[in-house]
Image (cartoon, rainbow, N blue to C red):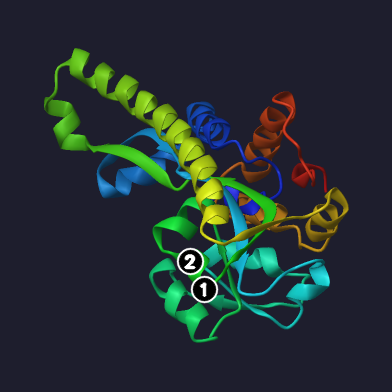
Amino acid sequence: NLPYVTPLVTADIGLVARTMSELVERYPQMAEQWQDYRQVYLTTAGSIDTYQVLTNYPVSSLEDFRGKKIAGVGLNLRYLTGLDASPVNSGISDWYNNLATGLVDGVIGWAEGSIAYRLYEVAPYLVDVRLGAVSTKVNNVNVRTLARLPEEVTNGLKETAEDYRDELAREADRRSAKSRIEFVERGGTIIALTPEQRQAWADGLPNIAGEWADDMEARGQPGHAILHEYMEIMRANDQPIVRQWDRE
């Protein structure tokens, strides 16, 4: 969940996936959670290059979110804190109908999803806030299955999982770029937020990263150290960080 609680840090899904894999190597306890499910961690992956907001009305300022019903799932609904918008917990399979019927005014989605689910028909405005990339997948292998495999196959699984992780990220970037073009071709409008608006959005959020780290610490995990290393890697890679989550 770490990338979910550090919004407005990076839209580089490849970097996020590699970083999460690297952190698991540095902090083996992050992978130990899979032992209860008889799974062995191979690598982290992701296919969402960055969360955006899709709306059925034009947006020119953050004030335009006030009083609007915006759908999302889980942690990303917290991105609405500070905007005076009303979060609505709703899965992507319901978004089209919810938008079409006026149940919601917008969704926290992403470019590829807007094309795959034809959301441009009912939410023709993509607010380019670039909330950030998230790792949404983990590649594992069953413990007993792994034990039956020869060492060269075991090593090959790890290498292949990393290759898959990196290619999936590249494909996510390709599809996102293509989807943005298609969104406009199909009548949609992409609305860019100014740096000042993105900063105001970030400043209005509670310290969700700090809350995550505190929760991890309460579970016996080095949450603050993991958060700090994640942000250090982002800084080392010159990411356009809007809020330094580990320095609060």
Sort mark 1 into few (<14), some (14-19) or many (20+) by Cα contacts within 10 Å.
many
Q: Residue at x 68, y 80 (%)?
A: 68
Outermost residue to the top: 152
Query: Residue 41 placed where, x, y %?
Result: 35, 35
Query: Residue 55 placed where, x, y %?
Result: 62, 70
Q: Amino acid at mark 1?
A: Val
In the picture provided, is 244 more to the left or to the right than 209? right
Above/below status of 68 relative to 81? below
Above/below status of 37 relative to 73? above
Sort mark 2 into few (<14), some (14-19) or many (20+) by Cα contacts within 10 Å.
many
Query: Residue 194 placed where, x, y %?
Result: 83, 52
Q: Is residue 2 visible?
A: no
Q: Amino acid at mark 2?
A: Leu
Q: Residue at x 57, y 31 (%)?
A: 15
Q: Residue at x 56, y 70 (%)?
A: 123
- Occupied quadrant, residue 40: top left
Residue 119's tag is 2
Secondary structure beneath dot 2 equals: helix
In the picture provided, is 243 more to the left or to the right than 57? right
Q: CA distance from mark 2 to mark 1?
A: 5 Å
Reading the image, the residue beneath label 1 is 122
- Occupied quadrant, residue 23: top right
In the picture provided, is 215 more to the left or to the right than 186? right
Q: Residue at x 53, y 27 (%)?
A: 26
| Image marks 2 and 1: residues in contact by CB distance under 8 Å | yes
Query: Residue 71 placed where, x, y %?
Result: 55, 73
- Occupied quadrant, residue 234: top right
How many numbered discs sit on the rendered protein?
2
